[in-house]
Amino acid sequence: MNAASRDEILAFGTATSEGPATTPGLDAWRELPLRQAPQWHDAEAFEAAVAELGQVPPLVFAGEVDVLRTRLADVAAGEAFLLTGGDCAETFAGSTANRISARVKTILQMAAVLTYGASVPVVKMGRIAGQFAKPRSSDTETREGVTLPSFRGEIVNGYDFTAQSRRHDARRMVQAYHTSASTLNLVRAFTQGGFADLRSVHRWNQGFLANPAYARYEEIAAEIDRAVRFMDAAGVDFEAMRRTEFYSAHEALLLDYERALTREDSRTGDPYATSAHFLWIGERTRAVDEAHVDFLSRVRNPIGVKLGPTTTAADAIALAEKLDPQREPGRLTFITRMGAERIRDVLPDLVAGVRDAGLSPVWVTDPMHGNTVTAKNGYKTRRFEDIMDEVTGFFDVHRQLGTHPGGMHVELTGDDVAECLGGADVVEESAFAEHYESLCDPRLNHQQSLELAFAVTAALAHTSRG
Ligand SMILES: O=C[C@H](O)[C@H](O)COP(=O)(O)O
Ligand SMILES: C=C(OP(=O)(O)O)C(=O)O
Ligand SMILES: [Mn+2]
């Protein structure tokens, strides 16, 4: 899309209804099976929280959401790559300036590597500013004979293992909104205020050059610098490079929260979820005739659906019919999370079936969620080599079918944690006790994230050059 049409969309897409959207059908989900729902313990507090969220300003604007849809249409058409990264579960205490900036920097570095190395535009998106709700395999957790409700993300309950903290407290939804607002404010400042300027590529490298991933990054950064100096000398106007588009995304698990933050666009009257630009439906809540799919079918945002290894082509086609009946370019993203062991067996039929039905969704790989294992010392972890292997499988399958491997969705942090095993600067189980910080799934640390970006760049460059 050219700059003028982006500005045109944004100029007209900045006002939304004051209260929650009243479009008919937005509450149909309430009559349908609803999985993974909290059991709020205080009905009055729940009503008050929902009423408050119904009146707060939107976090994102309809126009921005529409621009993202056009960006994703480019991805679906094979002309861009979508990079999504961030925490499995954000936390209130972890939403500090330093930590947010480290995560954003990591995504910007990965994007710079991809853009430069594969000569492909990268749509940048964070699991950020709203990724607070977690689906769980079990409703309860038992420690030393004591059983309590599972931790479901800080928008629902606390991580501390006490009855008080594990109670489902609806007031947390309001706190999640405010934390999302301050996080997004910082992300916008970073990405619009000059910090994301490609002329700052060196400044994003916060690590030690001794690590191979950092050293390689420095090499790329030096090349980008040289290219930028050349263009500067040749008189190119760099104003556009000072800013970058950066989109927010989270799993739309908590429908009470999403419904309360739905607003009508002043231009068209269409309902938009204003909690984030992009929302996805998780593997555990993607049944086509259930609540989550119904609600998300009724908002205009681009929607993702996680697809695990049991998904058939018929399942995916039914989801597409419900979520994207108009077959609108950029509306629908399928995020496959098959596991390294299975991806080469199950992905080909799925992708071929969807392609043969005439559909062109964005195809994204999530190489994290099918590769979770329990380490010998009990921590939930993932092996870096399995993550790499699933990514390679994803590219291989799409290359064989002639479809576009459109993006990657990973759990990462900008910090030097030890949660996933392996990588060039090998992380071992013994580091978990001191350096495992995630409250839910294990994330790639900063170095592992860069290493992955280099591997994907090589695969993408190979794919785009045929
Ligand atoms: O991203 C989240 C996890 O994969 C999901 O919450 C399931 O985790 P669990 O099996 O530990 O409940
Ligand atoms: C829960 C998640 O994924 P999935 O729905 O694929 O299991 C997640 O992305 O954190
Ligand atoms: Mn996760």
Image: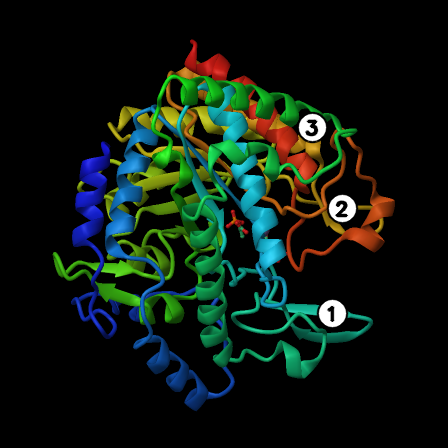
Res. 127 in view:
yes
**Secondary structure of residue under mark 2:** loop
Choose mark 2 or mark 3, whichever is in front: 3
Residue under label 3 = 213
Report the amino acid beneath label 3: Ala
**Secondary structure of residue under mark 3:** helix
Q: Position of residue 14 (x, y in %)?
A: 22, 58
> In percent of the image, x 49 and y 16: which residue is there?
461
Residue 55's quadrant in the figure?
bottom left
Q: Position of residue 233 (x, y in %)?
A: 42, 19
Q: Position of residue 449 (x, y in %)?
A: 63, 36
Residue 98's quadrant in the figure?
bottom right
Residue sitting farthest toward the left: 268
Residue under label 2 = 418
Looking at the image, tell me whether mark 3 or mark 1 is earlier in sequence order: 1
Residue sitting farthest toward the top: 466
Quadrant where the N terminus is found in the figure: top left
* Number of other residues with Cα within 10 Å of mark 2, as a class: few under 14, some 14 to 19, many 20 or more: many
Residue 391's quadrant in the figure?
top right
Report the amino acid beneath label 2: Ala
> In percent of the image, x 84 and y 47: which residue is there?
431
Quadrant where the C terminus is found in the figure: top left
Choose mark 3 or mark 1, whichever is in front: 3
Report the amino acid beneath label 1: Thr
Res. 345 in view:
no
Q: Position of residue 396 (x, y in %)?
A: 51, 18
